Amino acid sequence: AALEDHNIARVLGVCSQEEPFCVVMEYLEHGDLCQFLRSHGPSDTATTLPLGVKTLSYNCLLFMAAQIASGMRYLESLNFVHRDLSTRNCLVGKAYHIKISDFGTDNDLYADDYFKIEGGMALPVRWMSWESIYLGKYTTKSDVWSFGVTLWEILHLARRRPYDSLTDADVVENLGQLYRDEGNFLFLPRPAIPPATKDIVDLMGECWRRQESERPSFREIHLFLQRKTLGYAPAT
C-alpha cells in the first residue's frame, strides 16, 4: 500500500521493466534538505554573510525538524523502518515544507556518506545506531538514533558531517564502544551555530541512549518539537 502522509514524499511511478531502472518522485522546488541548509546561513550572523545569502532562524530549523518527526511518527505507526534518515533524504518545498524520501544511495553527491564494512553493502555508518551496525538490527528506535543525528545536522546547517574528525572505520569502532558497553563512546559535540538550547541537546542525547527501550518514540519527539514551535509560522 502507498504511504500517504503530509511529510512523506510520494512515489509517482516505478520503471522496473528495463534499464535504466528508476523511481519517479514528486517534485519539491528546493531539492534536498542538506543542500538547502548549506545554501543558507544562521540568522544571528546575517550581518557577516555575503550579500544575497539567505538566513534561517533557530525556530525555522526546529520547525523543519518537527516535520521530519511528524513524518517518522507516521512511519512508526505502521512499524515501517526507514533505515537511512538524514538531511540528504529529506526534500524541501514551499514555506519550508519538509517531506521524507529515500534516494541518498542513488546520488553520487553523497557517495562519501556510505561506507562498506568488510566488503558488505555500503552503509550510512555516521547516522546509524550501534545495534544496526553490529547486530544488523533495524527498528523504529534505530531510526530514532538517526533522527538525533539528523537534528544535529540541521542545527549545523549541514556544514559538518557527523564525526568529521573520524574516519569511517573509526566511526564504526566508536560505535563498538556501545556494543561492548565499555563506556568510552564519543558523542557528537553540542551544536554551536546557532546555540542549541539545553532541552534540544538533551533530546539528541536521549535519541543516542544505548538501550533502545530508553530512547523516545517518534510520537514523543514530535509532540515535544510541536510544543517548541507552537505558534511559529515561517515567512513565505
Image (spheres, helix red, strand yellow):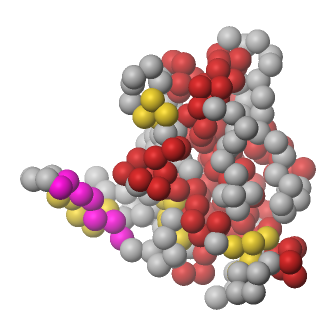
Q: Is residue 11 left or right of residue 197?
A: left
Q: Is residue 133 visible?
A: yes
* Quarter assignment of residue 38: bottom right
Q: Nearer the viewer, residue 232 or 176?
A: 176
* Quarter assignment of residue 96: bottom right
Magenta residues (range): 20-26
Magenta span contains residue 36: no
Query: What residue is drawn where x is 83% and y is 60%?
Result: 193
Query: What residue is drawn where x is 88% and y is 59%?
Result: 195
> Farthest residue toward the left?
17
Tell me if residue 36 comes above or below residue 34 in the rendering. Answer: below
Tell me if residue 26 comes above or below residue 89 in the rendering. Answer: below
Q: Position of residue 166 (x, y in %)?
A: 69, 33
Q: Position of residue 200 (x, y in %)?
A: 81, 51
Q: Is residue 225 visible?
A: no
Tell me if residue 82 comes above or below residue 89 in the rendering. Answer: above
Location of the C terminus (image quadrant):
bottom right
Query: What residue is drawn where x is 52% and y is 56%?
Result: 88
Looking at the image, how many numbered discs can be counted on the residues?
Answer: 0
Query: What residue is drawn where x is 66% and y is 58%?
Result: 158
Q: Is residue 191 left or right of residue 3?
A: right
Q: Position of residue 139 (x, y in %)?
A: 51, 32
Q: Position of residue 111 (x, y in %)?
A: 46, 46
Tell me if residue 189 comes above or below residue 62 in the rendering. Answer: above
